[in-house]
Structure formats: structure tokens, C-alpha cells
Image: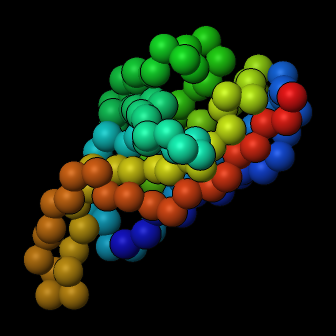
Amino acid sequence: VQLQASGGGLVQAGGSLRLSCAASGRIFNLGTMRWYRQAPGKQRELVAAITSGGSTNYADSVKGRFTISRDNAKKTMYLQMNSLKSEDTAVYYCSADLTYARTDDTPVAVADYWGQGTLVTVSS
């Protein structure tokens, strides 16, 4: 099982980026998915979350600028980031509550399964 985040890069303040997080492997169920970020010298913070039914919530710092979405058929989550600010610079990580199958087909439920991060750098 793997969560692959992509889409990070360097952008000027006021610009936009779209991050993706693709889940792969023998996944039976993909529940709530989340984006976190960690800026240099700071604690990791929850940016946004989306349930399998599409309910969302956001950190106050990104409300009105970021939009989280998902495509359940593609097992992929997105984060559209607009009006980027220098303080949005961070490594962005995705996570998911999921159930996957072991090689013997035994289901295993995992809360907050983490993927690798993707770096977003916003220049002022």
C-alpha cells in the first residue's frame, strides 16, 4: 500500500498549485483523507480533511484559499491551493484511514496511514 503525493514546486506569492495524493495497492476501503504540512522549524499541522462522502474541513489559515477534493474511483485526493502566501511554504503530506488486504487476503484497518511528502515553496 502506498500514498504518493505529487504536485509540489516553486511558485510566486499569489500563485496557485494543485497537489495530488494517489493511493495504490490492495485497498478495500479508503476512508477520510487528509493533508498535513510541516514548515521548517514548526510542528506538523492539519491543513484539510475530506471524508469518503465528501464532507470537508479546513484549517483557519487556509479557508477560502484551499480546496480539498477526491475522486473515489481513482483513489486520489487533491488540494487546490490558490492565493499562496510565503507562510504556506512547507512539506505537504497526505494520509488516509484505509483498509487493505494482506497477502493472505486478511483485511487490515489502519488509521492515518501516511504517504511521503511533497515540497511547496512560495517565494515572496
Taking the view exactly as shown, the residue that stands out farthest to the bottom is: 104
x and y percentages locating residue 97 in the rendered image:
27, 50
* Position of residue 85 in the picture relative to residue 80 (left or right): right
Q: Quadrant of residue 87?
A: top right
Task: Give the answer, above or below, for where 107 lies relative to 70.
Answer: below
The residue nearer to you, when weighing 87 against 23, is: 87
* Position of residue 118 in the picture relative to residue 108 (left or right): right
Residue at x 38% of width, y 58% of height: 114
Taking the view exactly as shown, the residue that stands out farthest to the front is: 41
The residue nearer to you, when weighing 9 against 123, is: 123
Q: Is residue 23 visible?
A: no
Task: Give the answer, above or below, for where 87 lies relative to 26.
Answer: above
Residue at x 29% of width, y 45% of height: 31
x and y percentages locating residue 107 in the rendered image:
14, 70
Residue at x 79% of width, y 36% of height: 122
Q: Is residue 104 visible?
A: yes
Taking the view exactly as shown, the residue that stands out farthest to the left is: 106
x and y percentages locating residue 2 in the rendered image:
43, 69
* Position of residue 89 in the picture relative to residue 78 (left or right): right
Task: Give the answer, above or below, for where 85 lies relative to 117.
Answer: above
* Quarter of the image with the C terminus in it: top right
Q: How many marks?
A: 0
* Quarter of the image with the N terminus in it: bottom left
Residue at x 14% of width, y 87% of height: 104
How was this image coloured? rainbow
